[in-house]
Amino acid sequence: MKIEVFRDLAIIILFAKLFGLLAKKLKAPQVVGEIVAGLIIGPSVLGLVGQSDFIAQLAEIGVLLLMFYAGLETDLKELLHTGPVALVIACMGVAVPLFGGYLLYSCFYGFSPAGSDMFYKAIFTGVIMTATSVGITVQTLRELGKLKSKVGTVIMSAAIIDDVIGIIVLTFVIGFKSPESNSLQVVINTVLFFAFALVVGFIIYKVFKMIDKRYFHQRRIPILGLCLCFAMAYAAEKYFGIADITGAYVAGIILCNLRDSEYIAEKMDISSYMIFGPVFFASIGLKTEFSGLTASLLLFSVCFVLVALITKIIGCGGISRLFGYKGRDCFKIGVGMMTRGEVALIVAQKGLAVGLMEPVFFTSVILLIICSSIITPVVMKLLYRGEPDDTAPADKPSDYAV
């Protein structure tokens, strides 16, 4: 490990916290400030810190801890109640952006016959738009005290399902382009993972319940919980080909009904607040480079961002009306689903590797991640303005306060 990483970490944490405090003073979510901090200290502006494998790995741990925390904070009864609704919302959150992305690419570069390379590239543009990054929405809902609310639970459930469906769609697209890829295997692996999580999760819960009864409110409980988080994340990706964040979230779900679930969440929040959270959010800004932008690519990128954001609102927010959600709540669900992050990057990089996307379009993906990561928390805060905190007393400071 190079010694420069210590300098980089000092800069990232300092700037992330300073800009997080500034965002708070401006009545904006602190995650917005941390993302902007990454953009300013990154290659695009000051060039103080560059993206490295070490920083990327810390950021990955950061998003895993966020997802684990989200699982711990989930109301399991509400999750089961909203599961069918979340499934339909997630399906529309994939279908509408998929069609929107295909249409956008085709309008710019021409409609091509099915089976051609241009046709698959157009479809892949839509596949990139299907991914939802739940980490930023989770943190925003936490700051607002709405993570356990009915709308918050629907967003969380739909976002997890959304990514699973998106990955399946990606595999099918690659499968059609490359006969070597087995699309059916991905579907089987997905079903097997959730079957595994159900059976093994029940056993683990019973074991943790016994340990919790004997060692209530002792630090060994959150330590074991963290081990479970990483183990489930590893198993999900290594053995089932499912995103590691899904495994981390499932680990939180397994433990969410323990007496000590809030104690575990509190200990996880300390690590996330101190280092992993700031690194994760700042790393989004660090990845952004604006070199090589042409006028036509800039126009495409702007349209790409607009279509990606609007189609999530239309798809997720629109369909939620059929399930009794009204006005502002529909908009909250749509906006909560429109963030893009690490999954979109993974999808884009996979597309580059198999020739479904040209390198020049990677800038569009980065712009989408930056814009959605900044716009979503701001709009969510405006939508929740005036509503009471559901999870904490009014005089209690945020767990993620600077």
Image (tube, rainbow, N blue to C red):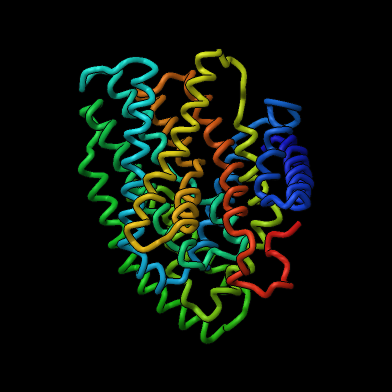
Identified at 73% across, 33% down, the residue is 41
Residue 311 visible at all: yes
- Give coordinates of residue 225: x percent, y percent: 52, 67
Locate residue 25 relative to residue 351 in the image: left or right. right
Locate residue 73 relative to residue 81 in the image: left or right. right
Identified at 74% across, 52% down, the residue is 24
- Give coordinates of residue 131: x percent, y percent: 42, 42
- Give coordinates of residue 275: x percent, y percent: 69, 52
Identified at 65% across, 49% down, the residue is 31
User: Can you say which quadrant of the picture contains the N terminus?
Assistant: top right
Question: From what the image shows, is residue 163 above or below residue 262?
Answer: above
User: Can you say which quadrant of the picture contains the C terminus?
Assistant: bottom right
Residue 238 visible at all: no
Question: From what the image shows, is residue 320 above or below residue 351?
Answer: below
Q: Quadrant of residue 169?
A: top left
- Give coordinates of residue 88: x percent, y percent: 31, 54
